[in-house]
Image (cartoon, helix red, strand yellow):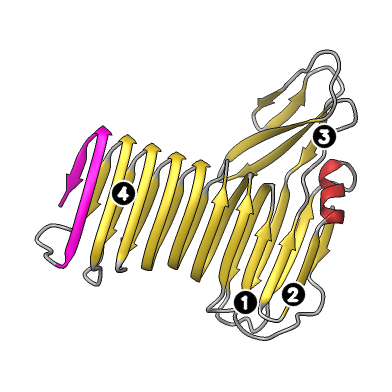
């Protein structure tokens, strides 16, 4: 195993965690009992591309800003690195190419076991970023191929990802820009601005004052709480739109549209 931890925290209380993680899984826990932030970047590998990326990662805190930067996992010289990440019962294989000559072979997954094909490939374990934050903290994350899992009540989220999913508990303010991946949030308290190209968006309970949920290929689902107000805009190009708790609510300005799919409002 290879890991890197946050040195002695520089401040007490809520922080903004600014995370850059190209691939892997980022797990953020909001702990009401925590007074300072804690962070660890880790992989099960002792050597190899993922271990090198962890060793080169930077974890620091300046006042109320916690910065975590994980570099790209480099492809093996003259070959390919296959990074295997398992989460939520599934396995993702990400391939990082170096300068390749000759043929490239893939992997086969049999009952959870990863079997490499013949060739010059390298199989690396995934990278995990484990963060614990005090209550009132927020997260800003930039990623290409990493999933984000948030447990607890997060004050604010700003997520920009290309291929990655979001699974969160309670979020005050949520801004998400994604290309491929589902967004699953248990509850939003203030506002939500979520736009993705390929993926489903689900908000279990929405009690805010403005919601904009846009997807090109995927379903949109939201349940409005009695405290919800203002505009709720939900659009899909290819997918269903389902809004609950919006009927007979004059305080709500509801816009629900899809080009190829079904719209349900009740």
Front label number (1 vs 4)? 1
Q: Earlier in the sequence, mark 1 or mark 2?
A: 1
Residue at x-position 26% and y-position 33%: 259
User: Where does residue 1 sit, x and y in percent of width and height?
Assistant: 84, 52
Quadrant in the picture for residue 222? bottom left
Q: Is residue 253 left or right of residue 87?
A: left
Q: Which residues are drawn in magenta?
A: 251-266
Q: Residues within 10 Å of mark 1 (few under 14, many from 20)?
A: many
Q: Are marks 1 and 3 in contact (CB under 8 Å)?
A: no
For marks 3 and 4 on the same chain, the one whose residue lies earlier in the sequence: 3
| Residue that mark 2 sits on | 61
**Residue where numbered disc 1 is placed:** 15
Q: Marks 1 and 2: CB-CB under 8 Å?
A: yes
- Kind of element beneath mark 2: strand
Q: Label 3, on which residue?
A: 75
Categorize mark 2 by other alpha carbons within 10 Å: few (<14), some (14-19), many (20+).
Answer: many
Q: According to the image, label 4 marks what residue?
A: 221
Measure the C-alpha gap from mark 2 to mark 4: 37 Å
Residue 223 vs residue 87, the one in the foreground: 223
């Amino acid at each position: 195993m290879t890991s890197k931890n946050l040195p002695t925290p520089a401040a007490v209380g809520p922080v903004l965690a600014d995370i850059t993680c190209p691939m892997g899984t980022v797990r953020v826990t909001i702990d009401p009992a925590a007074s300072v932030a804690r962070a660890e970047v880790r992989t099960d590998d002792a050597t190899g591309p993922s271990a090198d990326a962890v060793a080169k990662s930077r974890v620091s805190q300046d006042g109320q800003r916690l910065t975590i930067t994980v570099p790209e996992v480099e492809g093996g010289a003259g070959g390919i690195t296959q990074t295997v990440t398992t989460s939520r019962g599934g396995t993702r294989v990400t391939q990082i190419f170096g300068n390749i000559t000759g043929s490239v072979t893939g992997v086969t997954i049999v009952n959870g076991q990863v079997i490499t094909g013949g060739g010059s490939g390298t199989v690396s374990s995934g990278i995990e970023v484990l963060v614990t934050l005090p209550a009132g903290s927020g997260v800003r994350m930039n990623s290409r191929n990493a999933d984000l899992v948030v447990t607890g009540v997060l004050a604010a989220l700003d997520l920009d990802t290309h291929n990655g999913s979001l699974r969160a508990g309670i979020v005050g303010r949520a801004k998400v820009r994604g290309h491929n991946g589902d967004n699953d949030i248990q509850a939003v308290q203030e506002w939500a601005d979520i736009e993705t190209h390929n993926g489903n968006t689900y908000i279990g309970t929405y009690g805010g004052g403005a919601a904009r949920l846009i997807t090109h290929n995927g379903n949109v689902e939201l349940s409005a709480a009695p405290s919800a107000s203002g505009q709720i805009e939900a659009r899909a190009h290819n997918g269903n739109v389902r809004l609950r708790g919006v009927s007979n609510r004059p305080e709500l300005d509801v816009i629900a549209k899809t080009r190829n799919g079904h719209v349900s409002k009740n």
